[in-house]
Image (spheres, rainbow, N blue to C red):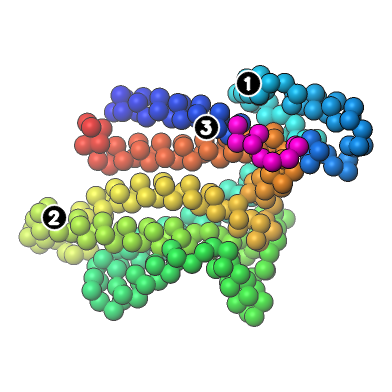
Amino acid sequence: MARYISTRLFHAVIIVLILTVLVFVIARLIPGDGVLAAMSGSVDMSNPAVVEHVRAEYGLDDPIHVQFVHWLSKFITGDWGTSIGTGERVRDMFLRRLPVTLELFVFATFWAIGIGIPVGLLSALRRQSKLDLVLMTGTILGMSIPSFWEAIVLIYLLAIALPLFPPSGYVPFSENPMQNVVAMILPSFVLGTHSAGLLARYVRSSVLEVIGQDFIRTARAKGLSERAVIIFHALKPALIPVVTVFGLSWGSMLAGAFFIEIIFAIPGLGRMSVDAIFQKDFPVIQATLIVVSINILLVNLVVDLLYGILDPRVRIQ
């Protein structure tokens, strides 16, 4: 197991290094002058001397490889730079927005797991029934409907026609816990819908595959109830591929959170990143992409380790 973990960690470090290079280069490929875009209106940008002074202050007049080494050496030590647009420390901006996005993410994960696993399990146990048909049709809809369209429909139905939820906005939990939860229901449900449908389909197919195995027939032959067979014998091996799928869907949920935050006017990392892209605010773009990428990488690393724990054959391979 130690060798399995060390191998996965080594691969993760290599991928992080590649990601840092890609993110740095891609941020520089965004069309337009970052200094002019980010500081337009805040200083006298008609004066070339001022523009050059600002560019030199942020090290943007150095060769790109020098900029990369300088940025990476500071980033590793926790200095993520200063926003060109706002003049704030990027790490402070990030930490202020992070709890909002994490909260949205936790709610969406609740919907994904709370809907996906029970629906998939129930559909497998009622295979070829009308209930199975209804549930699988629902999962296909959940996976097929674009998030922005689902968000618009739900806002119209549940926030305008039936004013059960606010159409947009965010209330900090420390100010009003109830309003905070109510405001997060719609955006988190939209964000978790696709993953719930994906999980349901994988749980169904995985459970159907497992309950046809010999050890399940042996458990039934021993006289165990169907509930005990499913819970204690079928569910664990059936969840092995589901863990992998959920790890992959975690990344797509994180990317989807960016759009959901814009649609519902939630002041999280997604909205901050989009604003930074339009302003070509290099320090913010780089820090956000790197931290989000590392987050997705860590989740997949945890999934790999869980996979090795659940199925010892993976460790041997």
The residue located at (88%, 40%) in the rendering is 42
Instruction: Between label 1 and label 2, give the one nearer the viewer.
Output: 1
Quadrant location, the N terminus: top left
Q: Upstream in the sequence, badge 1 or badge 2? A: 1
Give the residue number, with chain letter if any, for mark 2: 213
Q: Is residue 215 above or below residue 159?
A: above
- The picture places residue 283, in percent across and down from the top left corner, at 69, 33
Image coordinates of residue 99 in percent, x first then y, are 63, 46
Q: Earlier in the sequence, mark 2 or mark 3?
A: 3
Label 3 crowding class (10 Å Cα cut-off): few <14, some 14-19, many 20+?
A: some
Q: Secondary structure at mark 2?
A: loop
Q: Residue 125's spot in the image, x, y percent?
A: 24, 67
Q: Amino acid under label 1? A: His
Residue toward you, 185 or 68: 68
Question: How far is disc 1 from disc 2 in space, using C-alphas?
Answer: 57 Å
Question: Is residue 107 among what the camera can see?
Answer: yes
Q: Mark on residue 19?
A: 3
Residue at image location 52% in from the left, 35% down from the top: 294
Mark nearest the camera among 2 and 3 is 3
Q: On screen, 283 above or below 130?
A: above
The magenta stretch spans which residues? 25-34
